[in-house]
Image: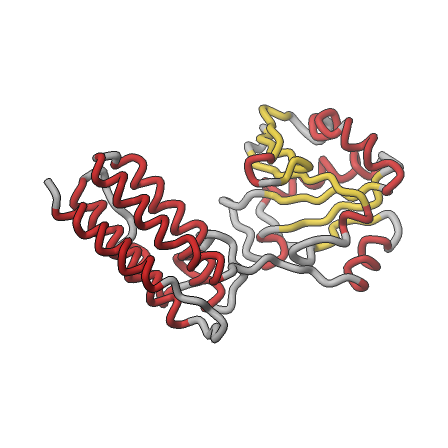
Amino acid sequence: MNLPPPHQSFLDRALPRLQADPRILGVAGAGSLITGTMDQYSDLDLVVVSRSADSAAVACERRALVEGLGPLLASFTGEHVGEPRLLICLYHRPLLHVDVKFVSLDEFAERIENPVVIWERGAELTAVIKKTPPVHPMPDLQWIEDRFWIWVHYAALRLGRGELFELLDFLGFLRQVVFGPLSLVQHGQLPRGVRRLETLAPRHLEAMKKTVASYDRDSCISAIRAAITLYRELRSEISNPSLIRRSEAEAAAVRYFEEMALAT
């Protein structure tokens, strides 16, 4: 692996400490380690795999384990991303963001991508990767279509009340949950929110930029209109003959939004 010096320095210090724990079977790397795109701005994503019989004990000791990997400044668990097994850590000397997820060997088989095995005690991590395929959750266009026009109506209500902060958050939510994933899939990429969208999804980039608003009513109106246009464009690009379009909801929500846009 060709890692930036701070990341390599951390691994050189941390790996021997993990290797010294007989309960730990191996360490794998995720994120940009998999794609070979790690740079000085990248997080270091690690998966620490323990024996299934020892996983509960390791989970209980995970804070002590990450504290032993280097000078830890702060850490918190990843419930906000639906992953309580994850510890999000900030280390010092070098200052580095490191995500450490603790899983059992059985849990390692259920993954969204194939990580890079950095170290393993035997060959059990490699064997699991060979035997079980990763399954990455893909965006469900019907799930989005069923919700999108309700979301537009919600935005119209917030516009009518003058809640611009709420609208700015709403537009960011659409980019993260709808536009980013759908655009990335159309570009042959995995749907990772808006990560590296500027380089991985160039075809929709200009349209995406128009969904970014400033704290200004007219700017929010323009951005919501751009969001509606972009969703319709993305929806038309995706071949899904079974899609049930919520046309009545679409027409009603867009009409109501335009009424709120014209109101003073």
Q: Residue at x 84, y 44 (%)?
A: 25
Nearest the eye: 141 or 204: 141
Q: Locate residue 124 relative to residue 87 in the image: left or right.
A: right
Q: Position of residue 99 (x, y in %)?
A: 62, 39
Nearest the eye: 261 or 110: 261
Q: Quadrant of the C terminus?
A: top left
Q: Is residue 68 above or below residue 231?
A: above
Q: Residue at x 37, y 71 (%)?
A: 236
Q: Position of residue 210 (x, y in %)?
A: 26, 55
Q: Position of residue 80 (x, y in %)?
A: 55, 36
Image-quadrant location for residue 115: bottom right
Q: Residue at x 74, y 30 (%)?
A: 62
Callout count: 0
Residue closest to the far left:
264
Q: Locate residue 160 relative to residue 183 in the image: left or right.
A: left
Q: Is residue 147 above or below residue 91?
A: below
Nearest the eye: 228 or 26: 228
Q: Residue at x 77, y 61 (%)?
A: 132
Image-quadrant location for residue 163: top left
